[in-house]
Image (cartoon, rainbow, N blue to C red):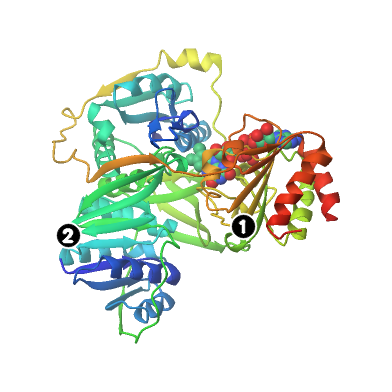
Amino acid sequence: MSEIWVVAEVPAALNELIAHAKGLAEGEKIIALTFSQDAAQAAASHGADRVLCFEGGQRPEAFVDQIIERAQAARPTAVLWGASRRDKEMAARVAAALDAGLVSECFSVKRNGSEFTTERCVYGGLCVASEVSQAPFMGTLTPKTIEAPAESPAVGIEVISGGAEKCQVLEMRPSKSSSNLGEASVVVCVGRGVSKREDIELARRLAKKLDGEVGCTRPVAEDLHWLPEENYIGISGQTVKPSVYIGIGVSGQIQHISGIRDSKTIIAIEQNENAPILEAADYTLVGDLYQLLPTLLDALKA
Amino acid sequence: MKIIACYKWVLDEADLKVEAQSRRLLTGRAKSKISEYDRNALECGVQLIDESGGEVIALTAGTGGAKSSLKDALSRGPAEAVFVKDEIMAQSDPAVTAKVLAAAVRHIGEYDLILCGEGSSDEYSEQVGIRLAQLLGIPVVSFVNKVQVADGVLRAERKLDGGIEVVQVQLPAVVTVLPDMNTPRIPSLKQILAAAKKPVKELNLAGLGLDQAQLTAKVRRQTVLGTVMERKGIRFRGEAREVVQQVLTVLNKEGLC
Ligand SMILES: Cc1cc2nc3c(=O)[nH]c(=O)nc-3n(C[C@H](O)[C@H](O)[C@H](O)COP(=O)(O)OP(=O)(O)OC[C@H]3O[C@@H](n4cnc5c(N)ncnc54)[C@H](O)[C@@H]3O)c2cc1C
């Protein structure tokens, strides 16, 4: 066991994993497993000692059997996976085949010899679980928990072809919209307390005036489809870290709060004083949003 | 078509509290429930059967406490339930749970489709359904929000980070479902009463041929502590104009107006 593997479908995740691997390595070489030339080149020029590029499959999952075989032969000390859904599927399949543990969405990994200690969120983000695994360690790692390493002289890329599987991909429809919520300095969040689709305009006006972005809770995106799914905030959606977050008719269930925890100031407009958002907020405007929000917009001349 | 829908009996996270000083998790007052996404899995199974005939078996592995889940699960439409009961499930990790479910599925025997929630609302490891497929040596289609079955072929839409992937695969297979797959039914009184008469098969781990080594969790939990968030918790009440005046002062301090 003298290797640490990093595996992810996208280059940004791969580079972060290399940084994590560098922090954990005790003499092990860092091997990057990639599924596109872009990702292979990124890994090759950001500190991986060896880069494999699996090519010719319809999708990364087509190489799971090959990864399992290689892992059985090489017995890496640790395999660090990205946290995209493809990465998660591959990780769980490889872990099952090797009868290995797998810690999901770790935001921190520390090592002491053959012992790996991880931290991750449980109960919708209410708690952090600290857990210990013995090598061989496997984990999917939350993105943006480390700086990517600086560029370094590139190593060569070994191309591996093949990729067979029983699933047949019929179509891939790339998502059109993307969201800037993660970088926004002000986030105005629409909750189900907003009773009509047109009223999102009120949130838009506020966001525009404050130079911010509009986000929403999950039901506003997934049940009502009033805003694109890329706009919902929380443990299963976007994580935001603005200087000011303003929730409008947001009750503040734990799964939503997990996504706004790193906001500097949290403001809520909420009529129910028992809603959990009041405990998570710095300031709550208690009352009917249909009175408070127009008054606020007037006062701001928004 | 024979469908196995797996579910986990979990603490309702809405009832959980954290003790501010010690950051200890307080579970004393918490009720249990069928994990949210597993309800979508059960619903998905029942809808497929409504369309093309067959039956759904609800499968759960848990401690004795999970017995109370059976009636709830059965009132959602499955014809029978299989309950693997062992106190060891309290210390299980995804590796162990998947092995237990795989053994139970082999015990059930014939099946066309296995449905699991994409992750559980307590641990949310998003692994069990995927591991289960691997252990059974059948394909998995993960993170699905649309399915169709015709002539033994499953067609599904996976919601991935980069977009929607449409895949097709020959059954048997495992599908892990997302919450926007469907809206789980709220059982009627009649369905709840009928559930009490449906068959339940109880299994134990020794009977499934699983030994201690297979049942030892790979990941050992050290602590579970509440996440801390220091907030001011100030409430502005009164006339809209006064309330707004106070928040303007806050926005002004932030340099926003
Ligand atoms: C496993 C799991 C994962 C989840 N992940 C996420 C996630 O990532 N993101 C997410 O957002 N949710 C998530 N959820 C859902 C979450 O639990 C809540 O259901 C959701 O966040 C609630 O959305 P809401 O606040 O918009 O709606 P509600 O809970 O319905 O709240 C609406 C609020 O508006 C207030 N209100 C109504 N009318 C007015 C008015 N006129 N003036 C002022 N206030 C008013 C009400 O008092 C209420 O508090 C998840 C759930 C589960 C089980």
Q: Which image quadrant for residue A277?
A: top right
Question: Residue at coordinates 31% horizontally, 46% vertically from top-left?
Answer: A130
Percent position (x, y) of residue A148? Answer: 41, 72
Percent position (x, y) of residue A123? Answer: 43, 39
How many marks are shown on the rendered structure?
2
Q: Quadrant of ligand 1?
A: top right
Q: Is residue A58 above or below residue B2?
A: below
* On-image quarter of the C terminus of chain A: bottom right
Q: Could you tell me which chain the residue with mark 1 belongs to? A: A
Q: Can residue A221 be seen from the camera position used here?
A: yes
Which of B174 and A42 lies nearest the eye of the viewer? A42
Along the polypeptide, which appears first: circle 2 or circle 1?
A: 2
Which of B23 and A109 lies nearest the eye of the viewer? B23
Percent position (x, y) of residue B56? Answer: 41, 30
Find numbered disc 2 in the image and state the secondary structure of the residue it sits on: loop
Find numbered disc 1 in the image and state the secondary structure of the residue it sits on: loop
Mark 2 vs mark 1: same chain?
yes
Question: Residue at coordinates 79% horizontally, 55% vertically from top-left?
Answer: A205
> Where is mark 1, residue-wise?
A243
Mark whose residue sits in front, 2 or 1: 1
Question: Residue at coordinates 59% horizontally, 63% vertically from top-left?
Answer: A183
Q: Is residue B135 above or below residue A4?
A: above
